[in-house]
Image (cartoon, rainbow, N blue to C red):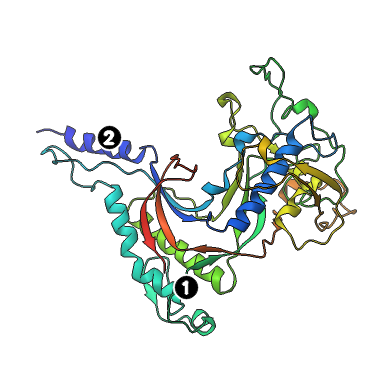
């Protein structure tokens, strides 16, 4: 009697679960040129301040590097990451059949099978529950949906910017580059509280380190999930994510968090410095987030001349001097508890307002790490929302 078959099956299953992710389900956010231009200006201005030759000691943003800036043409929300395989031409008699092969074709078929449910959510006639079923009992969307003969696309409103979990500042390292000069962008020896204004935005809410600063590896934009359009986005995202999770395509057990990454230190070059964080405190005190809040009427704290050609980020059309507004101050720390531990305070995202929205026509299956002719992700196809 051969008892090795179940053992081999378990090994094969574990290997399958550890396959490197190859594709992901994406909601594109690269369709509104006005928003992309504003984001390009913001990113270029950030890089200007990160340059030790152009930024000053009071406004330089430590830890910023062109390699961690995400090209706006690659902006998206991720609804699920998966490892897809090439279909086997002929199944082997000894091959385990307890789990079907997950392929691009089967993933696209599953995504497109959600078309009726997605269309009903878009039209506001029904609600999509997270288990993929439909409930005909949602008067809120139905009552507020405009009468129209065509199903409108999904409209995404990006209304705040925030960071992922705060981290410790980068450790002091030898950063000898090809030029032989030290990279002074992210050295722990330079970390200080100089220039931090009392009550600066988010400083009391994001968990400062021992010297009163906030460092992170990811800066992202988040969508509004309230109102008619926000509720549609939430329902559609949950429907797609939970369907692919239930069918075994998505194995990540973490809850879905819709976010559009703007800066990501995991892309830092050279690779030996991958993951070294940037100073969120420097970004906040610079007032540069006003590029993402055109409705701000606060007085500009400084002036910056931005030059798109120095960064390679497209669609900026800068080459002009731009005023940077400040943000409303957050409440100061309680005077009765001057030594209270601030790291336990909840995050407080910074509001942004593009005065516009992103129209989404399709949810796509994109190739992980791919680059098209314009540096966009390569799509394998998707499902139309309209």
Cα–Cα span, label 2 and label 1: 47 Å
Picture coordinates of residue 218, whole percent (x, y): 62, 43
Q: Residue at label 1?
A: 152
Disc 2 residue crowd, few under 14, some 14–19, many 20+, Cα 10 Å: few
**In terms of secondary structure, where does tag 2 sit?**
helix
Name the residue located 49 percent from the left edge and 43 percent from the top edge: 374
Q: Is residue 120 left or right of residue 7?
A: right
The answer to whether 155 is drawn above or below residue 312 in the figure is below
The residue that disc 2 covers is: 11
Residue occupying the point 33% across, 51% down: 248
Q: Toward the viewer: 205 or 361?
A: 361
Which structural element holds mark 1? loop
Q: Foreground mark, 2 or 1? A: 1
The quadrant in which the N terminus is found is top left
**Residue reaching furthest top?**
180
Q: Is residue 274 left or right of residue 25?
A: right
Residue 103: tell me if it is visible.
yes
Relative horizontal placement of residue 136, taking residue 314 as reference (left or right): left
- Residue 37 x, y percent position in the rendering: 64, 52
The answer to which of marks 2 and 1 sits earlier in the sequence is 2
Q: For residue 272, which quarter of the picture?
A: top right
List x then y, in percent, for residue 382: 37, 57
Task: Give 120 or 19, whichever is nearer the viewer.
Answer: 120
């Amino acid at each position: 009697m051969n008892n090795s078959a179940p053992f081999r099956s378990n090994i094969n299953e574990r290997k399958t679960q550890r396959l490197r992710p190859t594709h992901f389900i994406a909601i594109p956010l690269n369709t509104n040129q006005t928003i992309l231009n504003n984001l390009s200006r913001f990113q270029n201005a950030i890089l200007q301040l990160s340059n030790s030759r152009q930024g000053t000691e009071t406004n330089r943003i430590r830890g910023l590097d062109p390699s961690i800036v995400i090209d706006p043409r690659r902006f998206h929300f991720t609804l699920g990451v998966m490892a897809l395989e090439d279909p086997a031409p002929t199944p082997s008699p000894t091959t385990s059949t307890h789990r079907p092969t997950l392929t691009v074709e089967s993933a696209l078929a599953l995504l497109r099978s959600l078309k009726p449910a997605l269309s009903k959510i878009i039209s506001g006639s029904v609600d999509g529950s997270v288990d993929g079923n439909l409930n005909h009992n949602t008067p809120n969307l139905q009552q507020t949906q405009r009468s129209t003969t065509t199903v409108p696309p999904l409209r995404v409103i990006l209304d705040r910017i925030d960071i992922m979990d705060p981290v410790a500042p980068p450790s002091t390292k030898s950063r000898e580059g090809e030029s032989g000069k030290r990279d002074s962008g992210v050295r722990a020896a330079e970390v200080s509280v100089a220039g931090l204004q009392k009550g600066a935005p988010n400083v009391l809410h994001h968990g400062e380190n021992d010297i009163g600063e906030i460092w992170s590896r990811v800066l992202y934009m988040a969508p509004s999930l309230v109102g008619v359009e926000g509720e549609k986005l939430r329902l559609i995202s949950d429907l797609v994510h939970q369907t692919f999770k239930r069918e075994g395509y998505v194995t990540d057990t973490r809850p879905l968090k819709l976010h559009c990454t703007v800066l990501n230190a995991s892309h830092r070059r050279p690779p030996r410095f991958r993951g070294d964080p940037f100073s969120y405190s420097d970004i906040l005190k610079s007032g540069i987030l006003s590029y993402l809040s055109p409705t701000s009427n606060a007085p500009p704290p400084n002036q910056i001349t931005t030059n798109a050609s120095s960064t390679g980020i497209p669609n900026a059309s800068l080459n002009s001097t731009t005023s940077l507004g400040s943000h409303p101050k957050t409440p100061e720390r309680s005077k009765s508890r001057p030594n209270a531990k601030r790291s336990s305070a909840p995050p407080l995202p910074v509001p942004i307002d593009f005065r516009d929205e992103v129209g989404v026509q399709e949810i796509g299956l994109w190739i992980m790490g791919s680059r098209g002719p314009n540096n966009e992700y390569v799509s394998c196809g998707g499902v139309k929302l309209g």
